[in-house]
Amino acid sequence: MEQVINKLNLTKEQSDKFKIYYEFLVSENEKYNLTSITNIDEVYIKHFYDSSCALLYFDLTNKSLCDIGSGAGFPGIPLKILNPSIKLTIIEPTLKRVNFLKELCNRLEINDVNIICDRAESAISSFREAFDFVTARAVSNLRVLLELTIPYVSVKGSFIAYKGSNYLDEVNEAKGALKKLNSKVANTYMYNLLNDLGERVIIEIKKEKSCDLIYPRDYAKIKKKPL
């Protein structure tokens, strides 16, 4: 925990917020099935630190960001704690997790987060091409994920995909989806978690022009026949 606080150079206010976050996450975990990781050091490294790493590579100041399938709030809420200027929208389909996120924001005294209880393929009607950045972490494989996220990204904006060390296989499998969604892999950022807890990758996918309005399709169709 102290390593993360020092590594991120947290202010006292930020450190206090992460402490509240951790305690609320663990206390509500059984009720909401939020995470299999509850050890304090692992939560701080595998969730809080990992989520924050996008700030090493992207300037999110005053940018609009949509976190899709946020679950327990990763990576959107840690990013918002570290850079309060982010205009954050969270799309999460599970009502009990939405309730957790709303109460979490109340406890963290974050009042300007837009939390939407909906599926990504349904909420698109209100948010097509609405965001400078879209994030997703531990949601699905890249081939499926692209169809759920790229329609939300503004033209010339970026999708930030948090992935593990097997990312190359996912990128290769997603070449057809990238082409159909008028997007390309712009950058790949590799980093190691603290305490040798694993290697992670952030893939930046740039949207070059608008994609067909048929995307995203219903999730059943995406799963059955991914792009």
Image (spheres, grey):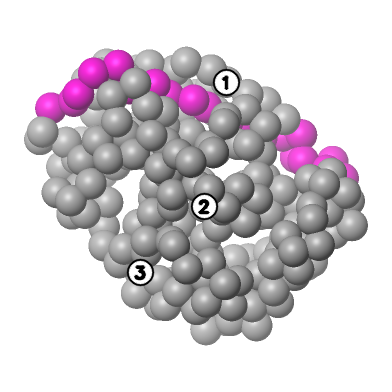
Nearest-to-viewer mark from 2 and 3:
2
Is residue 124 visible to the viewer in this orientation of the structure?
A: yes
Residue 122 screen position, x and y as percent? 18, 54
User: Residue tagged by mark 1?
Assistant: 188
Q: Residue at x 38, y 34 (%)?
A: 132
Q: Quadrant of residue 61?
A: top right
Q: Tell me the element at label 1.
A: strand
Outermost residue to the left: 214
Residue type, mark 1 in image: Thr
Residue type, mark 2 in image: Gly
User: Residue tagged by mark 2?
Assistant: 76
Disc number placed over residue 94 in the picture, else none: 3
Q: Earlier in the sequence, mark 2 or mark 3?
A: 2
Left/right of residue 106 with respect to residue 139 in the rendered view: right
Inter-mark Cα distance, 3 to 1: 30 Å
Q: Earlier in the sequence, mark 3 or mark 1?
A: 3
Residue 198 screen position, x and y as percent? 75, 40
Do residues under tags 2 and 1 come within 8 Å of each other at their CB atoms? no
Q: Residue at x 18, y 25 (%)?
A: 211
Left/right of residue 194 with respect to residue 225 in the rendered view: right
